Amino acid sequence: MRLDPDKLMRRHFEPVEQTYTAKDSILYALGLGLGRDPLDARELPFVYEERQLAVPTQAAVLGYPGFWMKEPDTGIDWRRVLHASQSVQLHRPLEPAGTVIGRTRIKDILDKGPDVGALFFVERTLEARDGALLATVEQAVMARGNGGFGGASGPSPAPAKLPESTPEHVCDLPTLTSQALLYRLSGDLNPLHADPEVARAGGFERPILHGLCSYGIACHGLLRMLCDYEPARLKRIDVRFSAPVYPGETIRVEAWGASGEVRFRATALERQKVVLNNGLAIIDAAQGAGA
């Protein structure tokens, strides 16, 4: 089926009400690799229900309408879909348990040509039951098999520019060879991350790590380096996905700045390959800083 952009722009997504528990938040954090050292008191609140905290990027997996691009009526070649960018803006700190209502819409579809694909911009808001806005989640997804449908090609949003200087903060976070199989339990069941045959059909030598897992690991790096593991200080985190991560690789997070607008990127250390680029985080300064 050929992609019909007008039909997709009108696509209706039913609101998704999701009640998540302390266990769900722990599973999400474990899927990012937190708690690897069970004696690390800084990480323990994210993986233990006493004085529990939630990782801010967990908002990206809440109220999710499912892998709708796999539905036959979309005309999307879902096996060739890649995550292009991700943004989460927290309007209030994420609780480790609660109920949210996710409202999803397709904001725009750009035609990047038959050799590149169709670029989808999708927005999801998360609300409390009383209507209070909790978070705004935006993503861009490249459907590599669906370009050339005759639509507008741009302009695309300009990426955050990284400094050319040496990064001011660096940390290395290893992943498990089974990381994708653990992370997928938080809701992203795309077989690209679990089934070797699907991965090969998509052009990869083996299943790759979820882009949102790499994104969450970068968030962990920022929490460690700049927030003293205080998640309420991280207000926004934007990235562009520039290359896949293979489970088992080490992700190096590099950042410029300590509060306000912080720029960052992430590299698959073993291959010296930038996997998350043009990162922008909004971070509140620590209380008393500069006093």
Image (tube, rainbow, N blue to C red):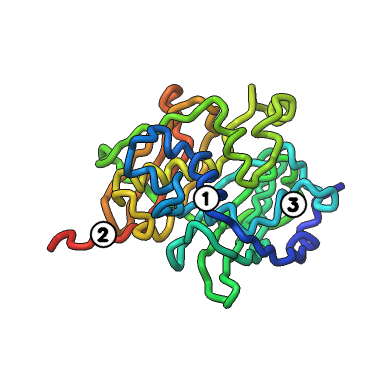
Q: Which residue is mark 3?
A: 68
Q: Which residue is mark 2?
A: 285
The residue most toward the bottom is 130
User: Which numbered disc, 1 or 3, marks the residue that appears first in the sequence?
Assistant: 1
Query: Where residue 201 sits: x, y (%)?
Result: 74, 28
Residue visible at 44% across and 46% down? 48
Q: Nearer the viewer, mark 2 or mark 1?
A: 1
Task: Report how far apart the C-alphas of labels 1 and 3 lie in the structure.
Answer: 24 Å
The residue most toward the front is 50
Task: Say left or right for 234 vs 67.
Answer: left
Query: Where residue 59 sits: x, y (%)?
Result: 53, 56
Task: Report how far apart the C-alphas of labels 2 and 1 lie in the structure.
Answer: 25 Å
Q: Which three-letter amino acid code belongs to the residue tagged 3? A: Trp
Q: Is disc 3 in contact with disc 2, using a CB cutoff of under 8 Å?
A: no
Q: Nearer the viewer, residue 145 or 185?
A: 185
Q: Which residue is mark 1?
A: 25
Residue visible at 69% across and 29% down? 199
Query: Where residue 65 sits: x, y (%)?
Result: 70, 56
Residue visible at 46% across and 40% down? 276
Task: Report how far apart the C-alphas of labels 3 and 2 lie in the structure.
Answer: 39 Å
Q: Which three-letter amino acid code belongs to the residue tagged 1? A: Ser
Q: Residues within 10 Å of mark 2 (few under 14, many from 20)?
A: some
User: Which numbered disc, 2 or 1, marks the residue that appears first in the sequence?
Assistant: 1
Q: Which three-letter amino acid code belongs to the residue tagged 2? A: Ala
Label 1 residue SS:
helix
Q: Is disc 2 in contact with disc 1, using a CB cutoff of under 8 Å?
A: no
Q: Residues within 10 Å of mark 3 (few under 14, many from 20)?
A: few
Quadrant of the drawing holding the C terminus: bottom left
Label 3 residue SS:
helix
Residue visible at 38% across and 49% down? 161
Q: Nearer the viewer, residue 169 or 98?
A: 98
From this view, report whether residue 28 is shown above or below residue 127: above
